[in-house]
Image: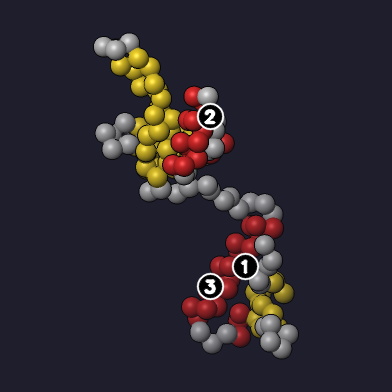
Amino acid sequence: MERLTFRFNNEVGYLEENNNDTVLCGEMTIPQIRECMEKLAAYEDLEEKNLLLKLPCNVGDPVWFITRTFDIAKQNISEIVERYTVTQLRGNKHNPIWYLSENAEGNTRDFHPTEIGRTVFVNVLEAAKKLEERNE
């Protein structure tokens, strides 16, 4: 993404589009805007260094799993698309990022972001399509 801010002598600034004037945040009269520009510059610095992580889903987002169900009485195994809600984002030294999710019955499942699109889906239609492919 194109950078909106720049750094000059330890100050943050931006280039006004209308007249190509340089504006330094220290010259801004509204403190809240100055703080926003400085925070945006910090994020842009991280993005330039590839240190800004963009997550595929957030806590509270729905996700869908293809779940295998067993009917012992009928001796039947089937697969269904089941909705879960992301409840936590976790990490440790072995798995820096992984999600914990829960369905309406209180069952929990965890998943790694690399599983999205393969075993867990952020869109119910994608999950249904994958289930259909598996049943062909």
Measured as percent of width and height from the top left, residue 2 is found at 69, 66
Residue 108 appears in the figure: yes
How many neighbours does mark 2 have within 10 angstroms: few (below 14), some (14-19), or many (20 or more)? few
Tell me the number on the disc at residue 16: none
SS for callout 3: helix
Above or below, comparing residue 3 to residue 19 in the picture:
above
- Residue underneath mark 1: 41
Q: Residue at point 54% right, 37% down?
A: 117
Query: Which of disc 2 and disc 3 is earlier in sequence?
Result: 3
**Do tag 3 and tag 2 residues touch (Cβ < 8 Å)?**
no
Amino acid under label 3? Cys
Q: Residue at point 51% right, 84% down?
A: 30
Q: Tell me the quarter of the picture where residue 67 sits.
A: top left
Query: Which of disc 2 and disc 1 is earlier in sequence?
Result: 1
Amino acid under label 2? Glu
SS for callout 2: helix
Measured as percent of width and height from the top left, residue 14 is found at 66, 77
Q: Residue at point 62% right, 67% down?
A: 41
In the image, 44: left or right of 62?
right
- Residue underneath mark 2: 133
Above or below, comparing residue 90 to residue 94 in the picture:
below
- Residue underneath mark 3: 36
Q: CA distance from mark 1 to mark 3?
A: 9 Å
SS for callout 1: helix
**How many numbered discs?**
3
In the image, 50: left or right of 37?
right
Q: Tell me the quarter of the picture where residue 25 sits.
A: bottom right
Q: CA distance from mark 1 to mark 2?
A: 45 Å
In the image, 33: left or right of 74?
right
